[in-house]
Image: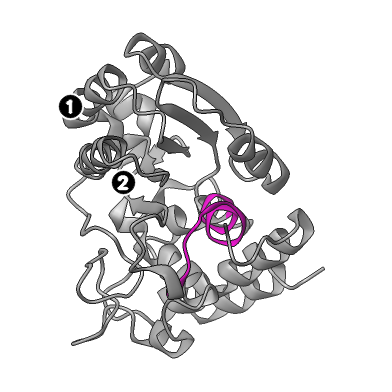
Amino acid sequence: MNPFMLTVAELEKKARAVRRRIIVLNAQSPAGGHTGADLSQVELLTALYFRILNCAPQNMASDERDIYIQSKGHAVGGYYCVLAEAGFIPVEWLSTYQHADSHLPGHPVRHKTPGIELNTGALGHGLPVAVGIALAAKRSNSTRRIFVVTGDGELAEGSNWEAALVAAHYQLDNLIIINDKNSLQLAGPTKEIMNTDPLDAKWRAFGLAVTECNGNSMQDVVDTLENLKPNGKPNVVIAHTTKGAGVSFIQGRAEWHHRVPKEDEVELALEELKDE
């Protein structure tokens, strides 16, 4: 069971706090960051860590804890902010993001950061590893669930579709794949660089159960994740999000894939993200 079990209103407030941390974290990083990708996933990660996952700092040694894998590893800045809010890492570490000898490198590294389950960053391997963990859990009669968040640009990697075949073949209904479908990647719109649509039809053709939601609506995210059923098929949630969601001058703009806010932009963003 999740140790927080926040209400939707509490989750929305937590998401604003996470977004404020993302802005400050990226602004202080000496090596830049992925502000747009960090912001698009906030509702997804906040709902997972503060309501859905059976996972907490005190049960990380449990064989029955749920597993979360951040396959879109370049969006680790937002992930760190959620881990800090949830007590996995000290909040003070956030100011060291990507500094020399930091516990918080530019991609998830398991032996450096408490709470990280898998080193990711080479896009396309988070889901295959998640499938392996889900298969091992099934064969061990474990009740744990395995959640993995992928980017939509990442789905151009063929290893994801090989993993989907395996997941469907072994009926891994303990696997929940969440596509952060913000429709933008490094160089522009995903549909112009490598169109993966229609994603819903592709996943179904591979034998997975598909649900879609507004990935930046906390109510929709919570309702969708809580209503997924183990039905003999892996579950895919296509979460339609906006890159840079939550900050007016960042959202929907491809140039914020690897850009960080400057001093005046930090002030403007934090003003927009004040609690209501």
Residue 39: x %, y % from top left: 51, 57
* Type of secondary structure dominating the magenta stretch: helix
Cα separation between marks 2 and 1: 19 Å
If you read the primary sequence from the N terminus, does the residue marked by circle 2 or circle 1 appear first?
A: 1
Q: Is residue 197 visible?
A: yes
Disc 2 marks a residue whose amino acid type is: Leu
Direction from residue 241 to residue 166 in the image, left or right: left
Could you tell me which secondary element the residue under label 2 belongs to? Answer: loop
Q: Which region shows up in magenta?
A: 43-57
Of the numbered discs in the image, which one, if any, rests on residue 254?
none
Q: Which residue corresponds to mark 1?
A: 158
Please rate how many residues cluster around mark 1, counting C-alpha atoms within 10 Å: few if below 14, some from 14 to 19, many from 20: few
Residue 51: x %, y % from top left: 62, 56
Eyeballing the image, is 60 above or below 159?
below
Please rate how many residues cluster around mark 2, counting C-alpha atoms within 10 Å: few if below 14, some from 14 to 19, many from 20: some
Residue depicted at 21% across the width and 37% down the height: 128
Q: Which residue corresponds to mark 2?
A: 186
